[in-house]
């Protein structure tokens, strides 16, 4: 059985769609998933990028695109009342549901994702966050330094591995970015010969013509 590391931030609608679609996309494959929360803004800051919501035309396209994906995948989605929002309380809660060093399970991630992407409510509403914390029966204080440090460590580890966006799937050190790479991830899990040849490495070495 192969392990997939699923790097996610609940702020990303694509991470939500990928999370919901994952069991169907990989049906019949032998795998286990470790869910690892990261701060998307931290990835953007490290790599010098802007988020899609920070570029008005890209923001409009992003939400049209996710509406279409929702329609074609049959996955319900409703944009939260405010987006972007501060995802830190939710990401920390994900880790606080387990003991030190323990990553959240699928139930925890599902609850957090649906808190954000179903119902159209305010993701960061204080009363909703309190209710969510009680529902998940957290084991540690999400505001404690231990949990905060774990989230920073997860984000730093993601950067060190070359993760630049969410969702990203890590399969044996190979990174697959985006919900649209799920068929590619499936092929890798099933031992497609393409991944055993030189194509994977060769495709990534095109020299840049311009550097800015």
Image (cartoon, rainbow, N blue to C red):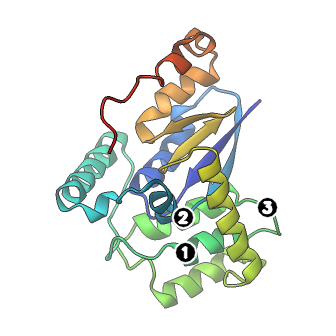
CB under 8 Å between callouts 1 and 2?
yes
Between 46 and 43, the residue placed more toward the observer is 46
Looking at the image, how many numbered discs can be counted on the residues? 3
The CA span between labels 1 and 2 is 7 Å
**From the viewer's perspective, is the residue at label 3 or at label 1 nearer?**
1
CB under 8 Å between callouts 2 and 3?
no
Q: Residue 29's x, y, as percent?
A: 65, 26
Between 120 and 185, the residue placed more toward the observer is 185
Name the residue: 47% across, 52% down: 15
Q: Residues within 10 Å of mark 3 (few under 14, many from 20)?
A: some
Find residue 142 and report its image quarter.
bottom right
Query: Can the viewer see residue 106 in this picture?
Result: no
Q: Secondary structure at mark 1?
A: helix
**Relative to 37, 41 lies left or right:** left
- Which numbered disc, 3 or 1, marks the residue that appears first in the sequence? 1
Q: Residues within 10 Å of mark 1 (few under 14, many from 20)?
A: many
Between 48 and 196, the residue placed more toward the observer is 48
- Which numbered disc, 1 or 2, marks the residue that appears first in the sequence? 2
The CA span between labels 3 and 1 is 18 Å
Question: In the drawing, what numbered circle is on residue 39?
Answer: 2
- Which numbered disc, 2 or 3, marks the residue that appears first in the sequence? 2
Q: Secondary structure at mark 3?
A: loop
Identify the residue position indicated by label 3 in the image: 102
Name the residue: 77% across, 29% down: 1
Q: Quadrant where the C terminus lies? A: top left
The CA span between labels 2 and 3 is 17 Å
Name the residue: 67% across, 34% down: 173
Q: Residue 74's x, y, as percent?
A: 36, 45
């Amino acid at each position: 059985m192969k392990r997939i590391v699923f790097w996610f931030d609940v702020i990303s609608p694509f991470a939500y769609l990928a999370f919901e679609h994952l069991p169907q996309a990989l049906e019949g494959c032998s795998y286990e998933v470790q869910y690892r929360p990261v701060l998307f803004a931290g990835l953007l800051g490290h790599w010098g990028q802007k988020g899609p919501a920070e570029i008005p035309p890209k923001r409009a396209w992003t939400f049209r695109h996710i509406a279409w994906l929702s329609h074609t995948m049959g996955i319900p989605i409703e944009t939260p009342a405010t987006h972007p929002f501060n995802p830190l309380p939710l990401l920390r809660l994900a880790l606080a549901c387990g003991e030190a060093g323990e990553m959240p399970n699928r139930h925890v991630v599902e609850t957090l994702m649906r808190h954000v992407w179903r119902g159209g409510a305010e993701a960061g509403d204080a009363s909703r966050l309190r209710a969510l914390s009680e529902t998940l029966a957290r084991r540690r204080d999400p505001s404690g330094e231990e949990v905060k440090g774990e989230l920073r460590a997860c984000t730093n580890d993601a950067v060190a591995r070359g993760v630049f966006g969410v969702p990203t799937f890590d399969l044996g050190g190979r990174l697959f970015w985006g919900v649209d790479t799920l068929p590619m991830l499936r092929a890798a899990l099933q031992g497609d010969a393409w991944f055993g040849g030189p194509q994977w490495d060769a495709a990534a070495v095109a020299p840049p013509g311009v550097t800015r």
